[in-house]
Amino acid sequence: MACRQIKEGVLLKKNELYLNDYAQLCREADGLEPEMFDKYEVQRGLRDKNGNGVVTGLTNISRIDAFKTVDGVKTPCEGKLWYRGYDCIELVKGFRGTRFGFEEAAYLLLFGNLPNEKQLKEFRDMLAANRTLPTNFTRDVIMKAPSSDIMNSLTRSVLTLASYDRNCSDTSVENVLRQCLNLISVFPMLAVYGYHSYNHYQNDESMYIHRPSRKLSTAENLLMMLRPDKSYTELEASVLDIALVLHMEHGGGNNSTFTTRVVTSSGSDTYSVIAAALSSLKGPKHGGANIKVVEMMQDLEKHVSDWEDEDAVRDYLKKILNKEAFDRKGLIYGMGHAVYSLSDPRAQVFKGFVHQLASAKGREKDFALYSMIERMAPEVIAEKARIYKGVSANVDFYSGFVYSMLEIPLEMFTPIFAIARIVGWSAHRIEELINMDKIIRPAYKSVMREQEYIPMNER
């Protein structure tokens, strides 16, 4: 046994040295001078220095407003997010206090119109009827390979569901709609069961597999299935429901939705498309951003003893920007957005409900700290660097705080984003299938040098 361990140790060390050497070769072979991007007018990240994106398609699903033209000049404005022509803030106001809005917003994004009472009931009944997994799927798929990365678990489950679908590769609108409705329905189950399996097998905690109720909304079912005692308050479910609505769709140009469009354009099946979108969303630069906000705030609370001391908080934020604090990346997470300038409307509408929940949970001190940083961070950032547009809190700044107040584990933050965003992905997949019928194939400018072949004995 000892001899085997020694051999394995030697092999690991050999592999490490090999990888270190050859990773450096990758850097040398693949490194490009930054000036070359300007020379060939290549927009890195598909955005120019003024934040304008490359237009890659048309959509009737949603829109983001961040600038307006005043006297022929592009001018920053308060942000707005539109779902099928409706201001998302007005949508939230419309259902707030009277009903849960996830299903209503999903109907709107998928079918283009606000549902009447009959249509909404039929849609809710359809989702409820689809909240079921194949026989033994939870045991044989989700529980067999538990992972701390619930997004990977979710992706694996989606791909495995393809094996249970006899019409997996049929890309007719009717079949794709069926598949999308089913996935929208079961995403909360796949994510929550994936978390409980990980928590049981890797953290040695008790296992809970609660079946969803046909009578409950998506937000209610999510909390009920996640919590050991199935209990939740009306306020908790309502705030989570609003979070799901605000994360459901975002203009079509975000990374995971573009991934949805690209993979759809190749003619691939729905399960592969959604798996690709999930893989995009899990990145910390996309769906994992709210986790970084929570971790940053935890680090601040460790290093700033008085949370009401504005000078101390400001100094900490400056240290972050100077790469002297937290993860040394120089970023104040939850601040700024690729598109929005003066404000993120999702953060604006969300903040009031966050305050309400913080009061109910006895977290007013935490909320005051978040509010202070929301006010202070743009000033600190503006002092540090010249920016082409305004910097304001984005929805990720508050969503992580909300999830922590709802006692949702950190591992579930990004999966909850996915539970909401699959609605937008589904709408964009269907729109791509109906309108485009061409594979998306962007161009890359090659800057390599041609070379003469060198025979083996001369290398």
Image: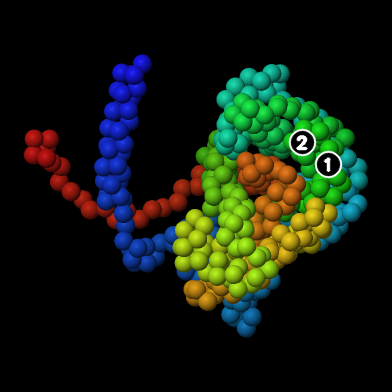
- On screen, 327 above or below 275? below
Furthest-top residue in this view? 1
- On screen, 101 above or below 32? above
Q: Which quadrant is home to the N terminus? A: top left
Residue type highlighted by circle 2: Arg
Chain-order first, disc 2 or disc 1: 2
Residue at (61, 26) in percent of width and height: 201
Q: Which mark is residue 304?
A: none
Q: In which quarter of the image is residue 13?
A: top left
The image position of residue 60, as x and y in percent, is 68, 55
Mark 1 is surrounded, within 10 Å at the Cα level, by few (under 14), some (14 to 19) or many (20 or more) other residues, namely some
For the residue pair 279 and 104, the one nearer the viewer reads as: 279
Judge left or right: residue 262 versus residue 83. Answer: left
For the residue pair 433 and 177, the one nearer the viewer reads as: 177
Q: Residue 232 carries which label?
A: 1
Residue type highlighted by circle 1: Tyr
The image position of residue 43, as x and y in percent, is 44, 62
Q: Can residue 10 be seen in this view?
A: yes
Cα distance in 3D space between marks 2 and 1: 8 Å
Where disc 2 sits, the SS reads loop
- On screen, 373 above or below 261? below
Q: Can residue 378 be seen in this view?
A: no
Mark 2 is surrounded, within 10 Å at the Cα level, by few (under 14), some (14 to 19) or many (20 or more) other residues, namely some
Residue holding disc 2: 227
Is disc 2 in contact with disc 1, using a CB cutoff of under 8 Å?
yes
Residue at (38, 53) in percent of width and height: 444
Where disc 1 sits, the SS reads loop
Residue at (70, 34) in percent of width and height: 192
